């Protein structure tokens, strides 16, 4: 019986020790201001061009070659810092909703594939994590659904 009573005391003490920590974490989360709501201008599609990086994950023949992406307007400045430049969507062949959906499907599939090491390699190739590009493409082309492709045949 004494062992049981001791176990109850230890269990109660652990519960008391854990309680203040969890309250502190909740309080810290509540203190953050909510992000401002997105506007129509924030999610306007903007086409950009980047270049495949000079890294071992890219074949020598593709290094420096341009690739095109479509992102939400709110993400343009961050991508320009990473070497991307704005291009005309007609030139980039991303002017139609179907083409934008195809890009979204492609980059979101890459973002969902593999482990952290794979994602790090893809970041070296594109210059930005695929999950960032996927999130921006979803703002422009709608939510990605695994297994459903909107790529033109």
Image: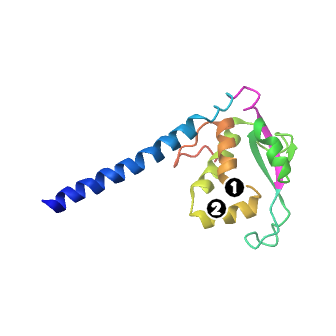
Question: Could you say where residue 68 lies in the image, as x and y percent from the top left?
Answer: 79, 50
Distance from disc 1 to disc 2, alpha carbons, whole Å, reads 7 Å
Q: Earlier in the sequence, mark 1 or mark 2?
A: 2
Name the side, left or right, on which 1 lies relative to 124.
left
Depth order, front residue of 45/21: 21
Residue at left 85%, top 53%?
Answer: 83
Residue at left 73%, top 36%?
Answer: 96
The image quarter in which residue 94 lies = top right
Q: What segment carries the magenta color?
A: 38-50
**Total number of numbered discs in the rendering:** 2
Can residue 11 be seen at all in this image of the molecule? yes
Instruction: Judge whether 64 appears above or below 32 on screen.
Output: below
Depth order, front residue of 24/42: 24
Say which mark, if any, is on residue 129: 1
The image quarter in which residue 71 lies = top right
Q: Which residue is mark 2?
A: 119
Residue at left 80%, top 61%?
Answer: 52
Instruction: Judge whether 100 appears above or below 13 on screen.
Output: above
Q: Name the secondary structure under disc 1.
A: loop
Depth order, front residue of 26/68: 26
Q: Residues within 10 Å of mark 1 (few under 14, many from 20)?
A: some
Question: Could you say where residue 55 lies in the image, as x and y percent from the top left?
Answer: 78, 70
Question: Could you say where residue 145 lies in the image, as x and y percent from the top left?
Answer: 53, 43
Depth order, front residue of 71/39: 39
The magenta stretch spans residue 100: no
Question: Could you say where residue 79 lies in the image, as x and y percent from the top left?
Answer: 80, 48
């Amino acid at each position: 019986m004494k062992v049981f009573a001791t176990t109850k005391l230890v269990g109660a003490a652990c519960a008391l020790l854990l309680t203040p920590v969890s309250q502190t974490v909740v309080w810290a989360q509540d203190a953050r201001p909510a992000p401002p709501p997105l506007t129509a201008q924030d999610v306007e599609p903007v086409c950009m061009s980047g270049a495949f990086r000079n890294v071992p994950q890219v074949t020598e023949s593709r290094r420096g070659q341009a690739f095109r992406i479509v992102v939400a307007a709110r993400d343009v400045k961050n991508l320009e810092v990473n070497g991307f430049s704005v291009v005309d969507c007609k030139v980039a062949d991303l002017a139609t909703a179907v083409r934008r959906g195809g890009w979204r499907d492609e980059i979101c599939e890459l973002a969902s594939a593999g482990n952290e090491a794979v994602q790090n390699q893809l970041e070296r190739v594109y210059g930005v994590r695929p999950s960032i590009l996927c999130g921006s493409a979803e703002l422009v082309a709608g939510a990605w659904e695994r297994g459903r492709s909107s790529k033109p045949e």
